Image (cartoon, grey):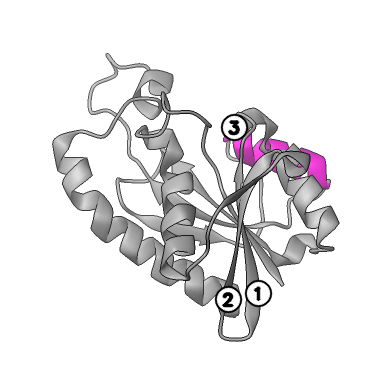
Amino acid sequence: MKLLVGLGNPGSAYAKTRHNIGFLAAEQFAKNHEGIFKEKRTFSANVAECRIQEEKIIVLLPTTFMNGSGEAVTATSGFWHIDPKDILVVYDDADLPFGLLRFRSSGSSGGHNGMKSIIEQLKTNEIKRLRIGIGRPERSAIPLDAWVLGTWNTEEQNQLPDILKQTCLRLEELLIS
């Protein structure tokens, strides 16, 4: 059994922001594999169960804000007895160009509050992660937090379906390897 965690912030105010691309990717993955999300208050998350070949995949969308994501991951992984080595987290990275995917099998949070919370709660940085580039504003006039919590521009929105398709293919590869 594996746990796929999509990072984002709950609520309609954040649904279409760059910071929520992890949610979008995990939601698309679940949809592709006939997973239906159900609210699990005891986990502080929405959870879907999927299968790839013989592998059961739990898809998790924490309903905490980003900096509390570790609580949901710890509760869920504890309930299903999922080892940190079987957890894959997908989230945004402003230091990567828009649409670029980068996988790491371990490491620091890189300043990402959601990943920081997960590392702190699980007490290990040996957690697989797939980062999706959201880029940075071309001019420094836009503060990074405003950029990350901003909505997609038209060009980005047009490219998003292809990026999510590529992300889901990569997630499948990583989850069955």
Q: Position of residue 90 (x, y in %)?
A: 52, 52
Q: Secondary structure at mark 3?
A: helix
Tell me which numbered mark, 3 or 2, is placed earlier along the sequence.
Answer: 2
Residue 36 drawn in magenta: no
Q: Amino acid at mark 2?
A: Arg
Quadrant location of the C terminus? bottom right
- As helix, strand or loop, the secondary structure at mark 2 comes to strand
Which portion, as a residue range, is magenta? 111-122
Towards the viewer: 114 or 2 = 2
Quadrant location of the N terminus in the rendered image: bottom right
Circle 3: residue type: Met
Q: Position of residue 72 (x, y in %)?
A: 72, 42
Mark whose residue sits in front, 3 or 1: 1
The residue at the point 51 percent across, 38 percent down is: 8
Q: Does residue 1 sit above or below 131 in this rendering?
A: below
- Report the residue marked by disc 2: 51
> Mark 1 highlights which residue?
56
When the figure is inspected, residue 163 is found, relative to residue 42, above or below; the finding is below
